[in-house]
Amino acid sequence: MSQLYDYGLVTRVGPNENLGLYEITERGRAALALREQYGEDEDFEELIEEYIQKSTN
């Protein structure tokens, strides 16, 4: 989970950050939606950013 947190895919929630409670972020939802495209020639980070921009417009 700490690696997902480092990538901004989840955020810590709850009264105490050390409880291990996480919530998926908008970036995490985008990565989940695009997971089948991971590993292709395209830059996955760029795909995530494009997905987020399209969903907010």
Image: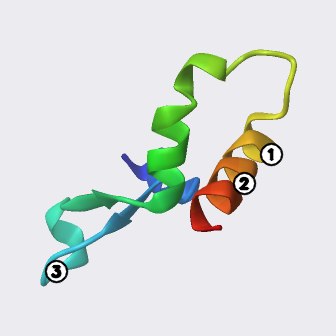
Label 3 neighbourhood size at 10 Å, few (<14), some (14-19), many (20+)?
Answer: few
Label 2 neighbourhood size at 10 Å, few (<14), some (14-19), many (20+)?
Answer: some
Residue lying at the far bottom of the rendered structure: 15
Q: Is residue 14 above or below residue 22?
A: below
Q: Is residue 10 above or below residue 47?
A: below
In the rendered image, which residue does mark 3 sit on? 16
Q: Is residue 19 above or below residue 10?
A: below
Q: CA distance from mark 3 to mark 1?
A: 33 Å
Query: Circles 1 and 2: CB distance less than 8 Å?
Result: yes
Q: Secondary structure at mark 1?
A: helix
Would residue 24 appear left or right of 27 to someone viewing this image? left
> Residue at 28% of width from left, 60% of height from top?
23
Q: Is residue 47 above or below residue 10?
A: above
Residues 28 and 53: in front is 53
Would residue 16 appear left or right of 25 to someone viewing this image? left
Label 1 neighbourhood size at 10 Å, few (<14), some (14-19), many (20+)?
Answer: few
Quarter of the image with the C terminus in it: bottom right
Would residue 2 appear left or right of 38 to someone viewing this image? left
> Residue at 66% of width from left, 22% of height from top?
38
Q: CA distance from mark 3 to mark 2?
A: 30 Å
Q: Amino acid at mark 3?
A: Asn
In the rendered image, which residue does mark 2 sit on? 49
Q: Nearer the viewer, mark 3 or mark 2?
A: 2
In the rendered image, which residue does mark 1 sit on? 46
Residue 8 sits in quarter? bottom right
Q: Secondary structure at mark 3?
A: loop
Residues 21 and 49: in front is 49
Which badge, 3 or 1, is on the more N-terminal residue? 3
